């Protein structure tokens, strides 16, 4: 099975804004420019799964239309990390003692009233395992997942056999496509490979 990972295009927010779970609009010019380029990297006729964020669900719907696919599901487990009290604020205006403590251990430490990377890892992994099993059972050879830097990074790291603490070693670029290939072995386990990143 081929699993295509698509990160949303550039959001229409000021540079340096912590927007995380906030439902922000897309930069229209960037969306129109990137849409056909993203579609060129995708096969036709796939089911698309998306984060509920408008910047993802709008892209997923447009890509499904452009590739004769279908929007198969919107799932909250694909949301970006929740930054709690920092949401919608400029990064450089956040309390330094809070951000420094967080950056020392983002796996286990959460922003005030937000979530940590470990929690996001668990929910994204749960979605992914269920979606892949369901697609396999339905006989799908390909699926697409439209998400965020954080949620898609979880899937890349898992595939590479890396731990949550290695989050800084992978990057998923805006408006780009990555692909994981997965096959079920004779003992019922999944064997996965990262085929390409950020095309």
Image (spheres, rainbow, N blue to C red):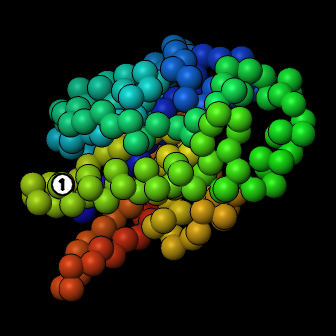
The residue furthest left is 138
In the image, 169: left or right of 194?
right
Q: Position of residue 90 (x, y in %)?
A: 78, 22
- Asked if residue 92 shows in the view, the reply is yes
**Which of the image's four quarters has the N terminus?**
bottom left
The residue furthest bottom is 187
Q: Nearer the viewer, residue 125 or 178?
A: 125
The residue furthest right is 96
Q: Nearer the viewer, residue 85 or 186?
A: 85
Residue found 42% across the figure and 41% down from its top: 78
Q: Position of residue 59 (x, y in %)?
A: 39, 27
* SS of the residue under disc 1: helix
- Asked if residue 178 shows in the view, the reply is no
Q: Nearer the viewer, residue 177 or 156?
A: 156
In the image, 193: left or right of 63?
right
Q: Quadrant of residue 12?
A: top right
In the image, 48: left or right of 156?
left
Residue found 60% across the figure and 51% down from its top: 117
Residue found 65% across the figure and 34% down from its top: 113
Q: Position of residue 193 (x, y in %)?
A: 41, 70
Q: Is 199 drawn above or below residue 168 in the view shown?
A: above
The residue indicated by pointer 1 is 135
Q: Quadrant of residue 141?
A: bottom left
Q: Position of residue 39 (x, y in %)?
A: 35, 36
Disc 1: CA contacts within 10 A as few (<14), some (14-19) or many (>=20): some
The residue furthest front is 113
In the image, 134: left or right of 175?
left
């Amino acid at each position: 099975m081929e699993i295509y990972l698509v990160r949303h295009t550039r959001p229409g927010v000021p540079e340096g804004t912590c927007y995380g779970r906030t439902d922000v609009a897309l930069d229209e010019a960037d969306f129109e420019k990137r849409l056909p380029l993203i579609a060129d990297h995708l096969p036709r006729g796939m089911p698309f799964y998306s984060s509920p964020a408008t910047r993802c669900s709008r892209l997923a719907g447009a890509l499904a239309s452009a590739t004769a696919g279908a929007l198969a599901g919107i799932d909250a487990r694909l949301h970006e990390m929740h930054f709690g009290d920092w949401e919608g604020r400029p990064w450089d205006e956040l309390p330094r003692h809070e951000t420094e403590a967080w950056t020392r251990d983002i796996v286990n430490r959460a922003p005030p009233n937000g979530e940590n990377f470990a929690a996001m890892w668990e929910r994204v992994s749960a979605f992914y395992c269920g979606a892949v099993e369901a697609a396999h059972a339905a006989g799908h050879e390909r699926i697409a997942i439209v998400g965020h830097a954080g949620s898609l990074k979880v899937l890349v790291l898992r595939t590479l056999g890396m731990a949550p603490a290695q989050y800084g070693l992978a990057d998923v670029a805006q408006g780009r496509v990555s692909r994981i290939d997965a096959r079920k072995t004779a003992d019922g386990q999944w064997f996965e490979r990262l085929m390409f990143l950020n095309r």
